[in-house]
Amino acid sequence: MTTDSIVSMEQETHHLLTLLGVPASQYNSGNLAVHTPLTGEVIAHVPEANTAAATEAITAAHKAFLEWRTVPAPKRGELIRLLGEEFRAALPTLGNLVTIETGKLLSEGFGEVQEMIDICTFAAGLSRQFAGLTVPSERAQHRMMETWHPLGVVGIISAFNFPVAVWSWNAALALVCGDAVVWKPSEKTPLTALAVQALFERAAAKFGGVPHGLSTLLIGDAAVGQQIVDSPLIPLVSATGSTAMGRAVAPKLAERFARAILELGGNNAAIICPSADLDLALRAIAFSAMGTAGQRCTTLRRLIVHESIYPTLIARLKKVFASIVVGDPRKAGTLVGPLIDERSFHAMQAALDEARSSGATITGGERVNPLGDSLAFYVRPALVEISAQTEFVKRETFAPILYVMKYSRFVDALTLHNDVPQGLSSAIFTTNLREAEEFLSVTGSDCGIANVNIGTSGAEIGGAFGGEKETGGGRESGSDAWKQYMRRTTNTINYGHELPLAQGVSFDI
Ligand code: NAD
């Protein structure tokens, strides 16, 4: 099919899926209807995994793990290098599909695939660096060391807004660590997941000898996720989504002593100090608050502005919020695409209604209809001026709403900043060294990510990603996040002829 002959979103989607190697049987039949937020129309039907199929897949993954763990780590890294090559070759195709399925801008769709390529590069290098420690023993002719071993099957549950990158952050690390993976993507974005699975299979075929079931996809709703959470064959579950989801899965994992990486909701803030470079801050605020239509876990949701610069900044922000182009995310010039669905739109309107009745001043927030399609939900981002951080501000509403507050003393700005249940990402805009350092210090931001003169969103894969409090405490991607995907053993070796006991204990028989 040529681009000229494409007549509908459905056909375009099927064309991309074919290019990515997904068989038609995986998207043209089945119970799960997939909608594109661009127009709201149905673009595919996908079969869901039933309980028996999920059990079978988890058992196969466990068997695959038993084999894969014996493959030397640098060889496992070669599989991930090949996977990265598949992603590189598929970047525009998969990036387009991400845009169709999530509504994010093309540059963001492409950026998401770039992130997958980057984590594969990181993980391939990491496969030669799973170094343990050697520790001095208190006993003569003894040596102590730590060894890292593969852990088992890793369950991955992901959200709609990063439908493929989150899988790669987890899977690239898990696979080089010697684990198998079972993935339940969001039921709103199964098509990009099917494409990623097809690309994995291409890489696996090139590698040769990959055990059956090493990476499995289970499409379905929360019930399939629960099966992963409950399976004794899965020692680690990495779950990304709302805090409500985390609240449901965390106790179940704790009950069976499974490990959890929880990447949950955020309520991210930036403090704008009197000395801030306002041009730079304005650009950072615009991208962090309105990018991806406010549907990033790291989206900027609260702005805490010093009273001396408040009138200037708010005037400039109002102009930007009023003029930003909302529309088809595939068109050049568009900066804000659609919300994922109607539910999301109503949640946004409910939050704005609460703000309105509390006396807030609201600019924007209304529905716009750039494509003339009543099934799609495009909104103008909302700027909401508030006098106090009341309860509705403390909730994450997954939509482009920026609450703006004033402060006069820096210490009060920090208090406001931390006074929410979530703790994912944060930023300060200042050229004052003392303020910047205090923000990053023990008495500053309580978030997992704290930035200076950079917005809250758009993290790089090299750092550990995650947040505190109701954000769940998980860390994934770079730094030493890999350690969660392995088990550590401490070994003590006696190469002498005596048996001295630790702590000088004597036990002569
Ligand atoms: P969601 O919680 O509705 O769903 C996320 C995933 O969890 C889906 O796959 C869903 O089917 C599954 N799920 C839901 N309930 C479950 C249960 N009881 N047991 C097992 N699985 C269950 O979230 P969403 O609407 O897809 O995504 C938006 C949310 O995700 C926002 O709150 C956002 O902040 C958060 N998010 C967080 C991060 C992060 O890294 N912290 C990244 C992306 C998104």
Image: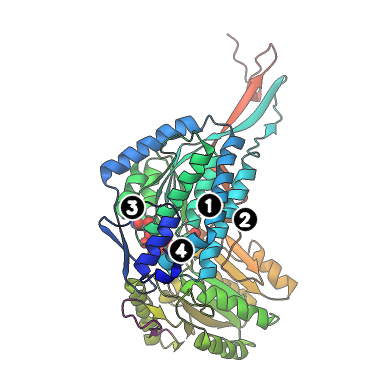
Instruction: Give the secondary structure at mark 1.
Output: helix
Q: Earlier in the sequence, mark 3 or mark 2?
A: 3
Q: Which residue is mark 3?
A: 26
Q: From the image, tell me which residue sits under label 4.
A: 98
| The label number, if any, that marks residue 463 in the structure image | 2
Colouring of the image: rainbow
Mark 4 and mark 1: Cα distance apart in space: 16 Å
Quick check: is the Cβ at mark 2 less than 8 Å away from ligand 1?
Answer: no
Q: Quadrant of the N terminus?
A: bottom left
Q: CA distance from mark 3 to mark 2?
A: 36 Å
Magenta residues? 365-376
Disc 4 to disc 2, C-alpha distance: 24 Å
Ligand 1 quadrant in view: bottom left
The amino acid on which the numbered mark 1 sits, given as a three-letter code, is Trp
Q: Amino acid at mark 4?
A: Val
Circle nearer the viewer, 4 or 2: 4
- Tell me the residue that label 1 is attached to: 169
Please say if the residues under marks 3 and 1 sit with CB atoms less than 8 Å apart.
no
Report the predominant secondary structure element of the magenta stretch. loop
Residue in view at x 62 percent, y 16 percent: 506
Q: Earlier in the sequence, mark 4 or mark 1?
A: 4
Residues at marks 3 and 4, CA–CA distance in whole angstroms: 17 Å
